[in-house]
Amino acid sequence: MSRLQEGVANQDLARLHVEHGAIAILLVTTPTRSVIATLKAILSVHNPLEESIGGVYETLDNLAGDETASLLEQFQNAPKVPVLPTRPLPEVIDHIKRTVAMAGYTFIEMDE
């Protein structure tokens, strides 16, 4: 994949990588109104970078060319990732806020 990523602007990949961290940390805790609102705000900006015409997905598909089927098979045969239980929001809120801020967003505080 790293060979294919050379065809995507580095700033886009770096931004998506940091945003993926923020999205992932929001999935660590039990979903609350605040967590869901923050996740929606991030995804409203993030998804078009990946999914729009000319976005990262299309670019990587085009760069993969004849290797698409082989890459898909590798992804489908990757080992399963274990799923851990969620953590209560008070235990992880500070880490969530820092990670979301590093991605350029603000954690949306709502009455729960």
Image (cartoon, rainbow, N blue to C red):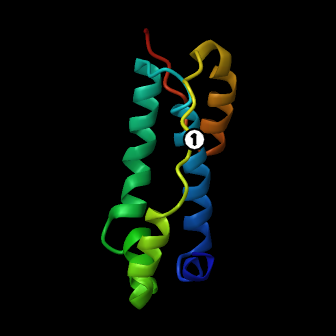
> Image point 62% across, 62% down: which residue?
14
- Is 48 placed above or below 36 here? below
User: Where is residue 62 shown, x and y percent of the image?
Assistant: 39, 84
User: Where is residue 100 shown, x and y percent of the image?
Assistant: 60, 37
Quadrant assignment for the N terminus: bottom right
How many callouts does the rendering have? 1
> Image point 35% across, 62% down: which residue?
51
- Is 85 placed above or below 22 here? above
- Report the amino acid beneath label 1: Ala
Q: Is residue 66 left or right of residue 18?
A: left
Residue 55 visible in image: no
Query: Which quarter of the figure has residue 72?
Result: bottom left
Q: Is residue 22 left or right of residue 64?
A: right
Q: Residue furthest bottom?
A: 66
Quadrant assignment for the C terminus: top left
Q: Residue furthest left?
A: 53
- Is 63 placed above or below 41 here? below
- Is 59 placed above or below 112 here? below
Residue toward you, 25 or 111 = 25
> Image point 59% across, 44% down: which residue?
104
> Image point 58% across, 17% down: which residue?
89
Residue toward you, 77 or 37 = 77
Residue toward you, 34 or 5 = 5
Residue 69 visible in image: yes
Element under label 1? Answer: helix
Using a 10 Å C-alpha cutoff, classify the residue at mark 1 as few (fewer than 14 neighbours), some (14 to 19) or many (20 or more): many
Query: Which quarter of the figure has residue 29?
Result: top right
User: Where is residue 7 shown, x and y percent of the image?
Assistant: 53, 83
User: Where is residue 38 shown, x and y percent of the image?
Assistant: 46, 31
Tell me the residue that label 1 is attached to. Answer: 22
